[in-house]
Amino acid sequence: MIVAVIAQTEPCWTAETAHFLCAGGGSLAMFAGDSVASSLDRRIHRLIAGFADTYGHHGSRSTRRLLDSLSRIVPDVVHIVDLVTDFYNYPMLLDGLSRMPVEIAVSTAWRSPGGALLRRPGYNSRIIARMTASMPRVTMVDPVATAGEAVALYRKLTAYA
């Protein structure tokens, strides 16, 4: 089983999860914000998003790089830990993932990574709900706290694939 984890920063459970997956013949690829987007990309994203609370809508270049990397490794499961971030465009990411033969786990506890001049409570939540409702391979999951929970989640998702 090949698992790709996408997060703003690397979760504390990824190293142990990678060890468990390797022991079973699988692997884990970690895509953190610093490895996907340049600091300039992230600054531009935060500047634009800071006006109208549109975090997660602007990082098209880094999202293309991320989708290219995912298409090269062809994971069985993609786990998006932080859906709304300052380094990728999540509508573009979800659309690209929906075209791949992968199971997608999205953590339900996301937050805006910064403040904005014009606050729009629930804006991203509504967009995410509309997008994921039409995607049959998306599973909304509670935040994962341990490697055991992560491995159990990935096994459950691939058992139904």
Image (spheres, grey):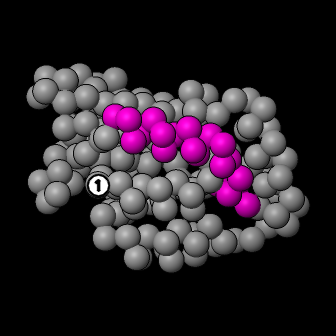
**Which of the 4 image quadrants contains residue 127?**
bottom right
**Which of the 4 image quadrants contains residue 16?**
top left
Across and down, in percent, residue 52 comes to: 82, 64
Q: Is residue 14 above or below residue 82?
A: above
Residue 6 visible in the picture: yes
**Which of the 4 image quadrants contains residue 133?**
bottom left
Residue 11 visible in the picture: no
Q: Amino acid at mark 1?
A: Pro
Q: Residue at x 56, y 27 (%)?
A: 35
Q: Residue at x 66, y 72 (%)?
A: 123
| 70 or 116, nearer to the observer | 70
Q: Residues within 10 Å of mark 1 (few under 14, many from 20)?
A: some
Task: Check residue 56 for magenta coloring.
Answer: yes
How many numbered markers are drawn? 1
Across and down, in percent, residue 11 comes to: 44, 33
Across and down, in percent, residue 147 comes to: 27, 34
| 115 or 126, nearer to the observer | 126
152 displayed left or right of 105: left
Task: Check residue 101 for magenta coloring.
Answer: no
Would you say the magenta stretch is mainly helix, strand or loop?
Answer: helix
Q: Residue at x 34, y 23 (%)?
A: 15
Q: Is residue 100 above or below residue 144?
A: below
Q: Quadrant of the N terminus?
A: top left
92 displayed left or right of 156: right
110 displayed left or right of 98: right
Q: Is residue 52 above or below residue 148?
A: below
| Residue at the disc numbered 1 | 101
Q: Is residue 92 above or below residue 4?
A: below
Say which element carries label 1: loop
Q: Residue at x 42, y 31 (%)?
A: 30
9 displayed left or right of 141: right
Residues rendered magenta in the picture: 54-73
